[in-house]
Image (tube, helix red, strand yellow):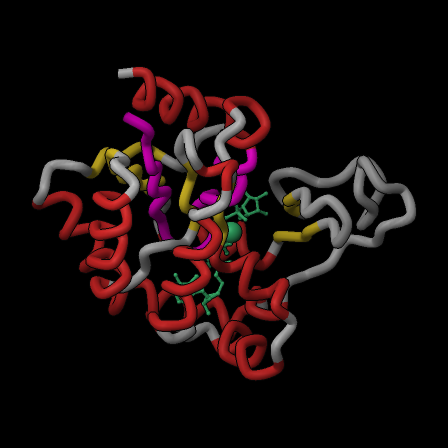
Amino acid sequence: MSKIIVLMGAPGAGKGTQARLLQERLGLPQISTGDMLRALRAEDIHSTQTSGKLISDEVVIRLVRERTEQDDCKHGYVLDGFPRTTAQAEMLEKLAAAQSNELIAILVDVPTEILEKRLTGRRNCPVCKEIYNAYFKPPRVDNVCDHHPNAQLERRSDDAPEKVHVRLQTYENQTRPVLDYYRDSGRLRTIDGTREREAIYKDIAAILNS
Ligand code: AP5
Ligand code: MG
């Protein structure tokens, strides 16, 4: 049976960082609803994302359904940033059943005071999407991607301090109940997300092998 790995965690917890490692090393496709929504380049979606509030369940559910029907998802995949509401979690149950996939949720747990620094310090390469951090993972040359010397790193519009506050509130109000949902059904594993990214990856890989 293939696995759906649901990476849970607050904004800045390191979901994207870990999903990229799982993709590189285990070949599991990273399905990031945040990245997919940003790639749509739709004005209304962009302004909602920048505000720190959520996009409608209908839009996001459709994106996930269509993406996971593609061939590369046949042997499992990693969800990064989905589900974020209980309605999305319910939809995912149906999808997992239809795809005969087992679902495992992994919470990358990081306290709020660390999250703020991770988000305000984050920079992304516009070409390969590599994730950097001004404090914790700086590029070799200031503000330039290690892999793309012509690419200036970008900052996400929702990483401004006042937006970070709204995102953390949205997470508490709308996504925390999803954690309870997985915990109550015995499918939530929690790992300490304050350590080095390799230590976190090791824990995730061990969960997948168990
Ligand atoms: P999304 O793009 O999913 O953002 P998010 O959940 O707020 O999470 P982030 O991407 O900010 O953080 P991350 O956990 O991926 O951390 P990262 O690895 O980058 O969503 C954005 C918006 O899209 C939402 O607000 C909403 O509007 C919309 N949206 C998305 N999904 C939706 C859905 N399902 N329903 C409705 N709307 C949706 O790491 C962060 C930083 O920390 C980086 O700089 C990194 O280098 C650093 N870092 C990572 N790990 C470590 C470590 N171990 N030690 C030190 N630094 C680290
Ligand atoms: Mg992310």
When asked about the image quadrant of residue 85, the answer is: bottom left
Q: Is residue 3 above or below residue 172?
A: above
Q: Is residue 104 visible?
A: no
- In the orientation shown, which residue stands out farthest toward the left? 184
184 in relation to 42, above or below: above
Magenta-drawn segment: 1-20
* Residue 91 x %, y %: 25, 58
- Foreground residue among 75 and 174: 75
- Could you tell me which residue is drawn at 30 percent across and 37 percent down? 106
| Residue 210 locus on image (x, y percent) | 26, 16
Residue 5 on the magenta segment: yes
Residue at horizontal 91%, vertical 48%?
150
Q: Residue at x 21, y 43 (%)?
A: 97
Q: Quadrant of residue 152?
A: bottom right
Position above or below: 14 against 192: below
Image x and y of residue 44, in percent: 55, 83
Q: Nearer the viewer, residue 132 or 36?
A: 36
- The residue located at (54%, 69%) in the rendering is 161
Instruction: Please indicate whether residue 120 sits to the left or right of residue 209 in the image.
Output: right
